[in-house]
Image (cartoon, rainbow, N blue to C red):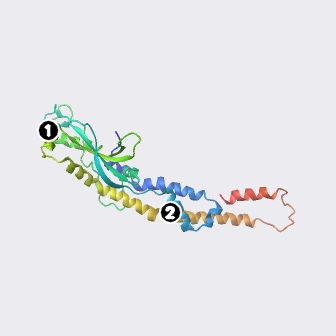
Amino acid sequence: MPKGLFLTFHRESQPLSAHLDAEILGPALRRVQEMSADQFAASTGDLVAGLSDEVRVEPPRLREQERAAQIVGTRRPTRIREVSHATTRHHVAVQVDGHADLLNYWPDRDDPGLTPIDTLDAGSLRPGNGEPFDFAAEVRRYEARSAQERWFLAPLEAGGPVVLQTWIELTQDEEFEVLRKERDPAAQIDRQRIMIEPIVRAIAAQTLDFFAVDLPRALTAAIDGRRDQVAARRAVYDSLTWPPPHPQALQVPTQHVRRASQDVVGR
């Protein structure tokens, strides 16, 4: 089963800022350190724009949704400890524009009061032997466990594009309620989507802000620092000259000296 999304785990262990720094900013800064002296003929602004375009990803946005697979669901507790209801899991796929992988991370800038979807405490999986059966507690555990799988990224078919998927579980009696127009599964899916849309919007906003502010600022500082480093190294090299004839002048072909100097100055 694919990993769930929008969970307390992501808020506590998967900050979006750390991911953007490691996967976007880090490689861009390494590119700066690999730049040759000749590349610094361009302006800092042009270099920042070029490097930003190389690493840019588009923020995720949710689009249309449609029904998908129907599979056997998990068993739902009843008021009798030994009895549970069989369910069918009805999947819905949501198209994601942009970089869907960013949905694996939690927006952690300027906390807007976002809430993970698994706020219920699952507690122990089952009550211990001899403990009284608590139907309400069992329902909370069922809902908490379900939240861990409620949203996930996966292709609809092998080799296909990744989409965001969710689902609802219905017993056979509940499916008959749909047949009688007494239950609206589409409205239930819509409610689930409403819960995550603020999280997705915050991920998109933080990603846009990263490329508009954080990345250019860090690259500007790195490029200016690297430009100064290259200029200083060039100055050292250029200063190491003496008027001819020098009694200790090296008797080596000029092209070897020039090639070696370019290797050092460009580093």
The x and y percentages for residue 98 are 40, 55
Whole-Å distance between the Cαs marked 2 and 1? 58 Å
Q: Nearer the viewer, residue 117 or 64?
A: 64
Label 2 Cα neighbours within 10 Å, binned few <14 / some 14-19 / many ≥20: some
Q: Quick check: can you spot residue 264?
A: yes
Name which residue lies at 16% across and 32% down.
Answer: 83
Q: Is residue 108 in view? A: no
Which residue sits at x=29%, y=50%? Answer: 65
The circle drawn on residue 218 is 2
Instruction: From the viewer's perspective, tell me whether residue 209 is left or right of residue 263.
Output: left
Neighbourhood count class around disc 1 (C-alpha, 10 Å): few under 14, some 14–19, many 20 upward: few
**Quadrant (top left, top right, bottom left, bottom right) of the C terminus:** bottom right
What is the quadrant of residue 97 in the picture?
A: bottom left
Q: Can you give x and y, in whole percent of width and height, for residue 32 in the image?
A: 57, 59
Secondary element under disc 2, as helix, strand or loop, is helix
**Residue 11 or 101: which is nearer the viewer?**
101
Q: In the figure, residue 85 lies in which quadrant?
A: top left
Tell me the element at label 1: helix
Count numbered badges in the picture: 2
Q: Position of residue 210 (x, y in %)?
A: 43, 61
Q: Amino acid at mark 2?
A: Ala
Q: Which residue is mark 1?
A: 173
Amino acid of disc 1: Asp
Quarter of the N terminus within the rendering: top left
State the mark number for residue 37: none
- Left or right: 35 with respect to 85? right
